[in-house]
Image (cartoon, rainbow, N blue to C red):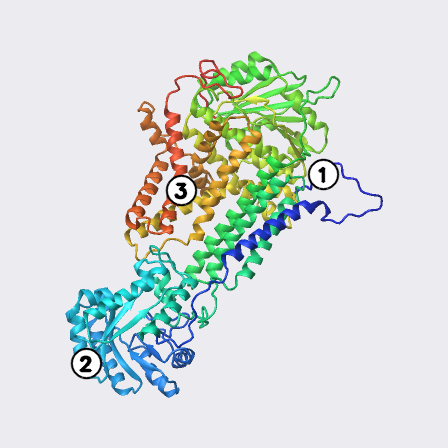
Amino acid sequence: MNAYVAPGSVKPPGALPHPLARHRGTLAILLIVALAHLGAWWALNRPVAMPDFRGQVNGLAFAPYQRGQSAEGDNWPTPDQIEGDLRRVAPVTRHIRTYAAHGGLERIPEIAWNSGLDLRITLGSWLDRRLDRNAAEVRRLVQVARESRNVERVLVGNEAVLRGDLTPAQMVGYLEQVRRQVRQPVSTAEPWHVWVDHPELGHAVDFITIHLLPYWEGLPVEDALRFIMEKYDQVQAMFPGKPIVIGEVGWPSDGRDIGAARATRVNQALFLRRFFNIAEQRGLDYFVMEAFDQPWKVSFEGRAAGHWGMYDLDRAPKWPLAGPVQETPTWLSWALGASFAAFLATFFFLSRRPDIRWQGKLMLAGIGQGFVALVTCVMLAMSETYLSWSASAVWGVLVAGQMLLLALLLSDGFELAETVWGRVSKRRWPALPAPDGMRLPKVSIHLPICNEPPEMVRQTLDALAELDYPDFEVLVVDNNTADPALWEPVAEHCARLGAKFRFFHLGKWPGFKAGALNFAFRETAPDAEVIGVLDSDYMVRPDWLRRMVPFFNRPEVGFTQSPQDYRDGGESFFKRLMFWEYAGFFKAGMVTRNERNAIIQHGTMTLIRRSAMASAAPDGKFWAEWCICEDSELGLRLMRQGWEAVYVPDSMGRGVMPDDFAAYRKQRHRWAFGAMQIVKGHWRALFNPLDRSLSQGQRFHFVMGWMPWFGDALGLAFVVGGFLWSLGLIFAPVRTEFPILLFMLPSLGLFAFKLVQLWLLYAARVPCGPLDRLAAALGGLALTHTIGKAVWQGLFKRRAHFARTPKMKDAPALVQGLLTAREEAVFLVLLWSAAVGVEVVHRHGTWEAVLWTVILLVQSVPYLAAVSMALLAAMPARKPVLSGVPGAVPATSSAGQVVARTEG
């Protein structure tokens, strides 16, 4: 990017200022915001005081699965791994509970005894619907219990009745079978409510083993102890005289919210340390759920199932039994990294524009620090989540999407800052008429047409005939028009206008518009030095050439560009809306791009130095016939050759806009598809830092200027993915969790920022009122789906597909509109249905549920905008809408009666 030097600075003789001296104000603001960012991390990670526990944990649920191992596969812990885990828990407790009598876990008593560890074991077994397997499990359970001196109790099955694998009667049968064969007390393990609902189980056991896990009940951690003691006392009252063992009690350190229950490291420590003290006071017999994290359970119990351990998967303790606890003990390193990365990213932008006022610098610094903080939190969550290779790939894609959003947000924020708060402009020139006596080179104006209404083309030619310029010619090239009634009147009109106007009818001709323009270039008068290109619907001002051609007196100028402007913005509310949606790019975006010689050339109201075109087309193809945006491709090619561009935001001519939503959408589809063709055709210049054919500023504007369209493509993928995910949340709510909150917030933040950005940019640069700003936003949103589709198609296809316009032109307006936007209407209905389904199933029980519903509704906004636009376009205009639209003409004038197929 070009560096900006504030005017008025004076260097003392011989002084060599420090390179950062002129950035002192920028650095001060960035440092203040970075410190505020660090302060937020500090405030959110203050140590939490809670009761200490100085005693010994009564018991731990013991499952020695290591990383990559699972009870659902054949990869079981080895004896050495089991012994290592037994030695880790021995200093903490004297009692452990196991869950299976197969896969080598039945050897846990033997390994503990042979290792000399003073551990008393409650031996467990796993029973399910497979009766033959259950029989073998019971035989091993009985054998180990009878052979082991350190087995103090026996558990027949774990939550088998809860899962519905066994009936209470079947479980009673197994219990009686085992009780007859072992000396130890026998029980089965079930949640508290199973014992309440099936008291017959209580009469068949020697002791009651209940599971008390208030997290699954959706209770806040503050009410959890009250709840478990109430249920403990309730079960004890039902079975007086029978010992009660709490087989599982605990709280996960990570996972989705369930009601008011939040799974965090602090909440896990708070719950268990409070419970340990109460259990010690009351003499409770319990096993903590559990010793080590077990991520293999996530696939069928959700994310929280992998985070119940007092130790993580790598056998590191998550928190101490005494002293304060931090949610993220390593927060400082993450915070410093995030703050420094945001500082550098923001300084990268602001160092290019030290002239930006402090408000703009503060805004961009806040955006950078805030969004980088969110991305850092996502990466922090990744580091604390046990991910399979497939899950890691999914998270990687999501993080890449977040980085794309970050780049988009910073570039948009920078554009907003320099547009609204920038103080210095280097490349703005008034387009003054050429003074008398100035040499004015000959201009050849090329007008490609195809199936255009003759009356519209005649108006364009009449305006050209009124040009106040001494030496020009007009070449009208008609290609691929089969109906003579369309092209012959144009040919006759050219003949009437005189020798300056030449008409060519090519019939069937390759290359579409680019092919016609290549033909015109070869037919250009030999003495013409400047080529002008005009769309067939544009009526130019008489002084267009006299004001723009003088810029070519500067030998470095390769082409000039005037904005696209329109004369039919007053015909209907639909066209008024389009008028202001177009205006934003030409009044703000192009002006900003011009500051770094990085404008987008568009195929009307452009003038090109003939020698520049020749130098950029060694193969003789002056216009790229492989690209449907041949105008933009040529502009980029000229810049790569080192030519400068001049953009003057003054309106020099006006055309007509698409007449319906289908044409409006088709036009934007062509622009987005063509942009992807250009990206593929010039990828080295755009992305290879070793390629110097573009300046940094040019590369920045071309890449980041198209980045919002990549964002629309990513948004379309997220819409499809969000809908499919919602189906899981609706039809499989237990197995499907809500996406992590940190992935939801950035997309909502970007959506809100884009609306604020449009509002501020329009307020600063586009002369329209608040309602027209909202209308422009509606128009832009309505094209989101179309642009997203075009990007995906452009990335993977070589040629664009032009969808035919829906028929039924005589149908009612409502039907016409819905047919025009039928694809968007389908997406709208699907997203709204998904939002209703999630709300019905989850009943806004958690913030995740509420936020996901909001995201579905926000994702539906562009589709609602598209349907609304289509309906507006289908409505007949009842009266002219002229107020506040520059250049608007009444709908009853001849210009307003033109029905054009615009390709601009």
In this orientation, which residue lies closer to the viewer: 565 or 542? 565
Q: Residue furthest front?
A: 281
Q: In this image, 585 relative to 815: left or right?
A: right
Which of the 4 image quadrants contains residue 427? Answer: top right
User: What is the distance, in whole Å, between disc 3 and disc 1 at their CAs?
Assistant: 43 Å
The percent coordinates of residue 206 (x first, y second) are 20, 78
Is the residue marked by circle 2 packed among few (<14), some (14-19), or many (20+) residues within 10 Å?
A: some
Q: Quadrant of the N terminus?
A: top right
The percent coordinates of residue 418 (x first, y second) are 61, 38
Question: Disc 1 on helix, strand or loop?
Answer: loop
The percent coordinates of residue 642 (x first, y second) are 68, 39
Q: In this image, 615 relative to 876: left or right?
A: right
The disc, 3 or 1, on the residue closer to the chain's N-terminal end is 1
The percent coordinates of residue 111 (x first, y second) are 36, 84
Residue at 25% in and 79% down: 154
Q: Foreground mark, 3 or 1? A: 1
User: What is the distance, in whole Å, between disc 3 and disc 2 at their CAs?
Assistant: 60 Å
User: What is the distance, in whole Å, between disc 1 and disc 2 at their CAs?
Assistant: 90 Å
Residue where numbered disc 1 is placed:
6
Contact between labelled residues 2 and 3, with CB atoms less than 8 Å apart = no
Residue 687 shows up from this direction:
yes
Residue at 43% in and 34% down: 782
| Mark 3: amino acid | Gln
